[in-house]
Image (cartoon, rainbow, N blue to C red):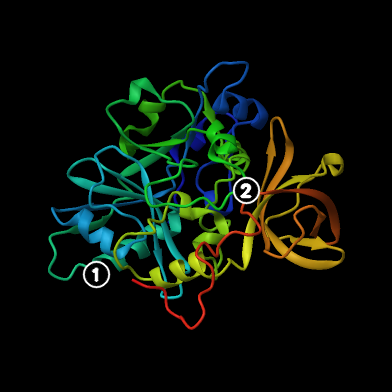
Amino acid sequence: MSYLSPLLNRHGAVQAGGLDAGVAAHYGDPNREQRLLAGYLGKPGTAVVDLSHRGVVSVAGPDRLSWLNTLSSQELTALAPNTGTELLLLTVQGRIEFDARVVDDGGTTWLIVEAEEAAPLAQWLASMKFMLRVEVADVSAEWAVVGSVSEVPEWDEYLAWVDPWPHLGAGGYSYAAVPEAEHPGLERPWREYLIPAGELESAVGQRPLAGVWAAEALRLAAWRPRRGAETDSKTIPHELDLLRTAVHLSKGCYKGQETVARVHNLGRPPRRLVFLQLDGSLHTLPAPGSEVILEDRVVGTVTSVAQHFEMGPIALAVVKRSVDPDAVLSVDDAGERYPANQEIIVATDAGQVVGRQTGFLRVPK
């Protein structure tokens, strides 16, 4: 049976679809909800977002952090309790299979993932236990995730994952075209609270609710990629600037590390994430999956679209690295054309940090 949040019973709730099926897209006033979530006129945000459809996987046992460290792109052996980080599980070719938000409470490591990821992630982790002292469980039905831009003092008793984005993590590397001090992600200090499912309604109480449309608009404005939206079967971390928060470049070996190192040191990612300011005169939004066009040539794909309360219609897209960063693009949704000004997220010259070495084909370990 598909999940339906109890908060869909709130006045005005309209259910979302796609990755966010099961929770509210909005509660009747998306722009007001977005302002209450983000904060405005110098006031902090007061609204929270129901993300209770998200998957939650728990990993307990004394070997949990060192074990996850050997499997993932992130350095976790010294992860302090209540510190948010992010890990990727990659294919041998370096393509993203799982992207997990990570927080440890001192006894259990919690992995917050997209709804469709929880069961396969728990199953895969369980198959990799061998003789180690770890216990893996898909606990999605027992825990609800609630998002917020501002800290909720009344929820101090609940564990919270604080998004490290866009701060450069230890061992990370920025592919962004702007320095961290100018990164728009600084305007979105995002956190996700883990609340027992049975306490979701009482914990939220009368606090203002914003739908996932509001959360998505702020995510796009922060240039924050999302698995299942900005990713496909070929996505490597470099294309989305995920080396800044989800990859430690000098940790020990893990599956996919060789590709990560080779592209970073010697090559360039074949695609890059861009931010699009869409023409709002059409009063509609193109659908995710729409083609990005340059002079009648398809050069990429729109991955996420939102109506921002200040900027109007915006989108994230993945385009070919060679696309002229100054070119005005257009988005084609079944014949409907939307002019789009691009803002560079991943720099066009990202990669080749060391430079290609002659007579040397393998990255040193």
Asked whether the beta carbons under mark 2 and mark 1 sit within 8 Å of each other, the answer is no
Q: Is residue 355 above or below residue 222?
A: below
Residue 85 makes an appearance in the image: yes
Give the CA separation, mark 2 to mark 1: 38 Å
**Mark 2 or 1: the one toward you:** 2
Q: Is residue 161 above or below residue 125?
A: above
Query: Please, what secondary structure does the residue beneath circle 1 have?
Result: loop
- The amino acid marked with disc number 1 is Met
Camera-side residue: 304 or 340?
Answer: 340
Q: Residue at x 27, y 59 (%)?
A: 69
The residue that label 2 is drawn on is 177
**Precedes in sequence: disc 2 or disc 1:** 1
Camera-side residue: 85 or 198?
Answer: 85
Which picture quadrant has residue 214? top right
From this viewpoint, which residue is outermost toward the front? Answer: 358
Residue 256 makes an appearance in the image: no
From this viewpoint, which residue is outermost toward the top? Answer: 42
- The amino acid marked with disc number 2 is Ala
Relative to 177, 78 lies left or right: left
Query: Please, what secondary structure does the residue beneath circle 2 have?
Result: loop
Q: Residue at x 51, y 25 (%)?
A: 47
Q: Position of residue 209 (x, y in %)?
A: 52, 28
The residue that label 1 is drawn on is 128
**Quarter of the picture holding the C terminus:** bottom left
Q: Position of residue 240 (x, y in %)?
A: 56, 56
Relative to 138, 285 lies left or right: right
Camera-side residue: 190 or 141?
Answer: 190
Q: Residue at x 81, y 55 (%)?
A: 329
Tell how many labels. 2
